[in-house]
Image (spheres, rainbow, N blue to C red):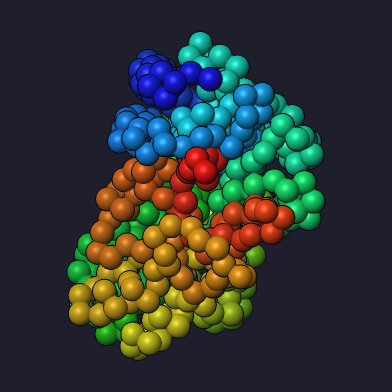
Amino acid sequence: MLTLEQRLEQVDELRTRLVKNQAALINAAIQDCAFTYRESALEVETVQERLAGFGDMAERFARRRPVAGPHQEVALILPYNGSAWLNTAITSIYLVGNRVRVKFASRGSHIAHLTEAIYRPIFGDAIRFDYANGKEFMARALTDPDVPAICMFGSDQHALQHEAAVRSFKKKFVFEGPGKDPFIVLSDADLEAAARELALSKYLYAGQTCTAPERVYVHEKVHDEFVRLFLELSRRVRLGDPADPATEMGPVISTQAVRAIKAQLKDAVAKGGRLALGGNLEGNLVPPTVILEATPDMLGMQEETFGPVAFIASFRNTAEALRLAKDSRYGLRATVYGQAEAEKITKALIGELYCHPVESRRFGVFGTVSMNQPRSETWVGAFVSKPVGGYGFSGWIWETVNDTFILKQGPKLLSLETSDEPG
């Protein structure tokens, strides 16, 4: 394995090659993910900045040793809703000294082959790309003694299937999963700023990010005005061909997600929800859709939506807002807009700064809580120097230490979780 300085130089070379291949990366994201030209171009630019941030981690990385030995490798299973940003996950594991075997989602074939073509001249076989189906890849990673750790992005239902095997083969299993993020608007919030942030983060990638807000709670005193502002912004979103630079939102990638959205909308209306906007799906094209008078028993308030659909409910006081926000099996990210009570709510929702052992899954807290800040600010350095991850079924780590099985939860860095401090 090369020295850390040499590995950092390789990542700098990767940044250069990403710039040279920007047009091809944008086209691959459009083909595989139906992301818009605007979103894809922004993602390529953003990942270049994030990769540069690894230099700030050099001193910390230098003190660590990789979990993988000289002839071993870390298995990395990537999500289907990603393109250029996935480079941060791959390189974070590599930079601490691990060889990496990468599995892209099957529908990301153009992105995978293009990424491999960019990587091979830089990293050689230290980072390898695997095109087996997901089931075969995971089975091999779980049983192969030369794979000490597995990092997986995906659904909690899928990840839970592997607990027995992880225990049996004593693997380290780092999981990043779904969110059902609450967005809280207090009575003294800057309503225009809150509405703009909700519209931006809700409709970015057509809502196909695990950190997109999905449960919106608005104080009853400002509910109607906030909804008016949000609906006005939602109506302005330009739908169309993802390849057209003027398009602001394209279709939902997954047909399964579209089916889930239809089921959630049908359930919401049956339970008294009011469809204020959208709902008229055309194939996989889901327009901005807003359900008012949402209740906790609705599917759309319980299960991840993964689409451009917002469920909005009102609350009377801080205690009710906290109760509603905490009422979820997921705990990835939360957003609070307001003044007098905003800090109190933020402190009540935030978990610990970095992942830590827990006796059982911890619910009602979140890995990241944003207070009066846009997503663009709170996500700076994510996966590079900013730990990301959550609680409940939004993410966890399984590992066996001295024959004791340990569960950890909270924000994490893949680099630190695939390396150790020398004993």
- Image coords of residue 139 (percent x, y): 78, 40
State whether residue 24 is above or below residue 331.
above
Is residue 370 among what the camera can see? Answer: yes
- Image coords of residue 5 (percent x, y): 38, 21
- Image coords of residue 174 (percent x, y): 59, 48
Is residue 292 among what the camera can see? Answer: no
Farthest-out residue, front: 423
Q: Nearer the viewer, residue 400 or 125?
A: 400
Q: Nearer the viewer, residue 88 or 267?
A: 88
Q: Nearer the viewer, residue 393 or 217?
A: 393
State whether residue 17 is above or below residue 408.
above
- Image coords of residue 403 (percent x, y): 72, 55
Q: Residue 346: name its quadrant.
A: bottom left
Which residue: 64% across, 47% down?
Answer: 172
269 left or right, relative to 323: right
Which residue: 48% across, 43% down?
Answer: 421
352 left or right, relative to 157: left
Which residue: 53% across, 20% down?
Answer: 1
Farthest-out residue, top: 121
Q: Residue 32: name its quadrant.
A: top right
Which residue: 20% across, 75% down?
Answer: 339
Q: Nearer the viewer, residue 207 or 259?
A: 207
348 left or right, relative to 94: left
State whether residue 17 is above or below residue 406.
above
